[in-house]
Amino acid sequence: MDKIYITGGKRLEGRVRISGSKNATLAVLAAALTSKGEVTLRNVPEIGDIDTMLELFEVLGVQIRRTPQDPTEITLNCANLATSEAPYDIVNRMRASFNVLGPLLARNGHARVALPGGCDIGARPVDFHLKGLEAMGAVIHVNKGYVEAVCPRLRGANILMDYPSVTATSHLMATACLAEGRTVIESAAMEPEVMDVAAFLSKMGARIWGAGTKTIEIEGVGELGPCRHNMIPDRMEAGTFALAAAITGGEIFLEGAIPEQMTATLLKLQQTGTVVEPLGLPARQDHLASGTIAGMFEPEGRIETDTAVAAHGLMVVGPKRPQPVDIRTMPHPGFPTDMQQPMASLLCIADGCSLITETLFERRFKYVNELQRMGANIRTDGQSAIILGVDRLIGCQVQASDLRAGAALVLAGLVAEGETEVDKVHYIDRGYSQIVRKLAGVGADISRRDVEAPVIAMAA
């Protein structure tokens, strides 16, 4: 029953340390199941989805050790898995947990994983995953809400993705590392998160070429070993805090953010009149002589120190009033669908009319009614939202319908007059680490409270 309370009107100023990437960490965790060695991950975000994945790992028999002095560092030992079944009650909570199917199959020759759940933003079929596994020789049956896969030894294959799904690309790439022979994934997703998974797998001994392009090649190996890996920063969290600076006319330095991974978001922010300036060390993308990926900013597997991460990032300075822009969501390197809802909050107070077209998920405008309650002049027409900027938003009671919708409502609350009460904050917890503390640290009037459920009198 936790709720977030925001009194708007504060100009935000200061520094925010960007947490590790949610999407990359979830994919890396699933890929870690391919290793029989000890794996240490740093910069792991403290969010609900990671807790869910680690809960699943405990069921699978993975040994998990947290570093007492650093809650963002965990060590995994997947050498002796207890089962190849991922139960419904966990997988149904989070879609990314489905990515354990391929690694379990590659390790044990069989796997049984429940069909996934997650935020209700539209159809996200698992067909891309299953077709790829079948191409590598898996025999698959869907029975009573579970996917059952069997194959004594997977074989390399040519796989054509019907859609450049990030989760499916990472899933099949990790699985192919233990397949016999060469796998080629065509029309692959090109997101930075896919590149980070490839970097992680390469450190364990995988042979991968082309991650970050439309064609990825994997040469299967007999076994993957131990490694240490530092997760890339979360570009969606960085984008959300950049929007927090923009919507309040504030000035925030985003520690550790990598501008090169946020190009589309930053270009649209600049069009609104927001100033964005990369500072400190540039991001690096190094390749080993063998052609495998070494990491986004970890040459030859070196883990960045806290000092080095803090030395680079992004300064964002908001305008007096944002200018309108048109946005069309697209797969990377286009404008990310996860930034569509937060961006809408900024455009609600823009000086003019903006158009947002959502091309990826059909139910990603469920948050519009809540922004309308706050006084936004916004309406939907099919897969588009037309936003006519207003002079002010008014705080009121609203509720999140999914992760990014929750972020959009928090952003709107930062600039709204009066108090905004955001309900169903468990959605926000899925992807944002300590968002209330971080916003309060840069000057927001924001708090989180545990509100008891009302007592309902029952008739005799």
Image (tube, rainbow, N blue to C red):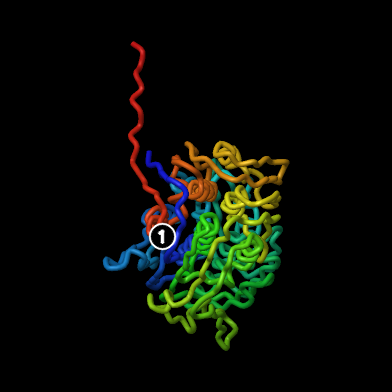
Residue name at image x 53 percent, y 51 percent: 95
Percent across and percent down for residue 411 are 51, 50
Q: Outermost residue toward the bottom?
A: 289
Let me know if residue 137 appears in the view.
Answer: no
Left or right position of 442 against 69: right
Vertical position of residue 280 compared to residue 96: above or below: below
Local packing at callout 1 (Cα closer than 10 Å; few below 14, some 14-19, many 20+) is many
Residue name at image x 45 percent, y 53 percent: 10
Quadrant of the frame with the C terminus: top left
Q: How many marks?
A: 1
Let me know if residue 64 appears in the view.
Answer: yes
Which quadrant of the figure has residue 367?
A: top right
Which residue in the protein does label 1 denote? 442
Which quadrant of the figure has residue 183?
A: bottom right
Front residue of 430/309: it is 309
Assign a secondary structure to mark 1: loop
Percent across and percent down for residue 448 are 36, 46
Residue name at image x 60 percent, y 49 percent: 349
Percent across and percent down for residue 410 are 48, 48
Vertical position of residue 292 compared to residue 58: above or below: below
Vertical position of residue 299 compared to residue 115: above or below: below
Quadrant of the frame with the N terminus: top left
Percent across and percent down for residue 22 are 48, 60
Front residue of 216/273: it is 273
Front residue of 192/245: it is 245
Q: Outermost residue toward the left?
A: 68
Name which residue type carries label 1: Val
